[in-house]
Image (cartoon, rainbow, N blue to C red):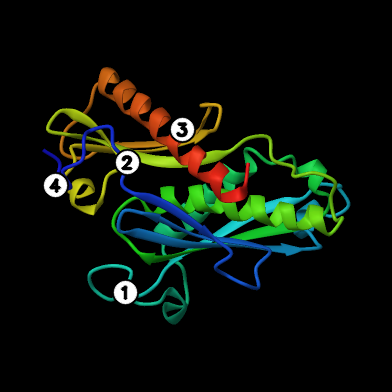
Amino acid sequence: MRPSGRAADALRPVSIETGVARHAEGSCLIRMGGTEVLCAASVEGRVPPFLRNQGIGWVTAEYGMLPRATHTRGEREAARGKQSGRTQEIQRLIGRALRAVVDRKAMGEMTITLDCDVINADGGTRCAAITGAWVALHLAFQHCVRHNIMSAVPLADHVAAVSCGISQGEAILDLDYAEDSAAEADANFVLTGGGALVEVQATAEGAVFSEAQFLAMLDLARDGVAQLVARQKAAVGL
């Protein structure tokens, strides 16, 4: 029995509330169980120096956790004067995941920055951030279409992410903190709406895992992402 009482293939309750950051071109608050992430998309009419005069756009992300997102207060990274390695790794992951489904030529020379701020953390924050960031990005593109900045939303597909793990030898979907801290193996799967792989992060924790167990996690992830994509579609009106 999982600590939450969920079946092995069950997601935590998921909700996506849009328009929560009133000044952002696109935003949402995504909740996956006890994890809550605010995602906001900001549009700028310029690109980084390495992309100037190439006629393509840029999508990037920043990620952070509020001090009391966890059980004990964490120090603000701004107060330390530098980001942790974990923060840098996660925000780069979010940026890569989103760029995988964006037609950057169709964007023109603009930058969209996704700010993903964790309000409450209960496992799977990077997965929730990726899933919510896609919604914020889509809404920002819709804003650009309404204002005749571009003719169509330049997204080739959805992208969403979910965690899986091995607990007591069994593959389980969407780990909360209690499960993640005790799992024999854990993985994060970033997939497109069509089921293609964007990125997979998988680690043996308490014990090594087999190819069969990995494939069992992948099967769960595909089902989980399909459910998350349905939530994304509802959130942006598709």
Q: Which marked residue is nearer to the observer: mark 3 or mark 1?
A: 3
Earlier in the chain: of badge 4 and badge 1, it is: 4
Residue at which label 1 appears: 68
Earlier in the chain: of badge 3 and badge 2, it is: 2
Q: CA distance from mark 4 to mark 1?
A: 23 Å
Q: CA distance from mark 3 to mark 2?
A: 11 Å
Earlier in the chain: of badge 3 and badge 1, it is: 1
Q: Residue at x 20, y 40 (%)?
A: 6
Which is more toward the observer, 52 or 37? 37
SS type, badge 1: loop
Q: CA distance from mark 1 to mark 2?
A: 25 Å
Residue at which label 2 appears: 11
Task: Locate the C terminus by quadrant.
Answer: top right
Earlier in the chain: of badge 3 and badge 4, it is: 4
In this view, 167 is above or below 39: above
Q: Amino acid at mark 1?
A: Arg
Q: Residue at x 29, y 19 (%)?
A: 211
**Image location (x, y in percent) of residue 138:** 65, 50
Residue at which label 3 appears: 226
Judged left or right of residue 141, residue 91 is left
Q: CA distance from mark 3 to mark 4?
A: 24 Å
Can you see residue 64? yes
Q: Residue at x 34, y 58 (%)?
A: 35
Residue at which label 4 appears: 3
SS type, badge 4: loop
